[in-house]
Amino acid sequence: MTTLLSLSGVNKSFGALTVADDVTFDLPQGQALGIIGPNGAGKSTLFNLIGGALSVSSGTVTFQGRDITRAKAADRCHAGIARSFQIPHPFIGMSVYENLLAAAQFGNAGFADPTQACRDILDRTGLLPKANRPASSLTLLERKRLELARALATGPKLLLLDEIAGGLTEAECHELIATIKDIHASGVTIIWIEHIVHALLAVVDHLMVIDFGKIVASGDPRRVMDDPMVQEIYMGISVDDAA
């Protein structure tokens, strides 16, 4: 399989605090990778290193065979890396549709017809009926969908989802899962950080566990979740407790 993203020996430190510790992995094109870990494990920091919001202390980041280790966040977006954030921050003074048009224009998506492409994305993410409403009027689920739609409007090859299901009801979560499955089925490679594990497992085909900035487990999602070490790190369930 073609490798889309590759991290080799990536480290990030803030003084004596190490937040990414020799992170190394290859992400095949078309894969949906899930990432879990305790709060403060370094998951969002990893996204910042991939997306360019933070620079690495050492190591290399390669995307589509090109070294982007020192590339700016905007250049990475133009290359095809898009991200959603845990807390949506739409342009609240603009309409939902205008939010997407801005993303398509400044994200350098290269659509032949940006207006139609944005309309199609709104339809795909269930926001078409809200297209002309102010972004400030949206519910939490709708803001999460707008966060996703804006990322798609940049025309990504790699989509980074940071706890996009957080705060949703069970029914809303199922709606979001269906949308993300559809996006993945269209060929977009995904890395998804999530604490709502059942949502993650419904989509991803590979699971990675991070603790103290280090990859401690990686592989088939069900096998990883059944690993006693992972259960102790992530859920606080030790072998002795289970007995």
Image (cartoon, grey):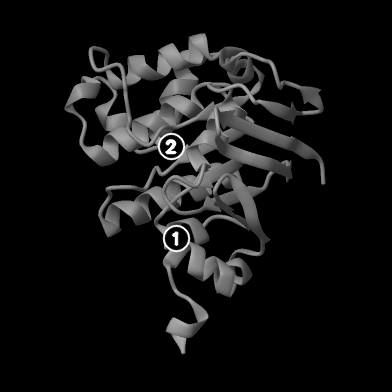
Task: Give residue 112's quadrant in the image.
Answer: top right
Q: What amino acid type is highlighted by mark number 2?
A: Arg
- The alpha-carbon separation of the residues under discs 2 and 1 comes to 24 Å
Mark 2: which secondary structure? helix
- Asked if residue 174 can be seen in this view, the reply is yes
Task: Give residue 108's quadrant in the image.
Answer: top right
Q: What amino acid type is highlighted by mark number 1?
A: Val
Frontmost residue, 220 versus 2: 220
Q: Position of residue 148 (x, y in %)?
A: 42, 33
Q: Which mark is residue 16?
A: none
Seen at 35% across and 51% down, the residue is 175
Give the answer, above or below, for where 140 lies relative to 15.
below
Q: Which residue is mark 2?
A: 124
Seen at 30% across and 22% down, the residue is 96
Total labels: the figure holds 2
| Dot placed on the residue nearer the N-terminal end, 2 or 1 | 2
| Number of other residues with Cα within 10 Å of mark 1, as a class: few under 14, some 14 to 19, many 20 or more | some
Of circles 2 and 1, which is in front?
1
Mark 1: which secondary structure? helix
Using residue 223 as the reference point, say whether residue 132 is left or right of it: left
Furthest-bottom residue in this view: 243
Frontmost residue, 112 versus 75: 75
Frontmost residue, 68 versus 83: 68
Give the answer, above or below, for where 52 lies relative to 19.
above
Q: Position of residue 229 (x, y in %)?
A: 57, 69
Seen at 66% across and 64% down, the residue is 220
Give the answer, above or below, for where 168 lies relative to 68.
below
Seen at 21% across and 31% down, the residue is 138
| Number of other residues with Cα within 10 Å of mark 2, as a class: few under 14, some 14 to 19, many 20 or more | some
Q: Position of residue 60 (x, y in %)?
A: 75, 28
Q: Which residue is mark 1?
A: 197
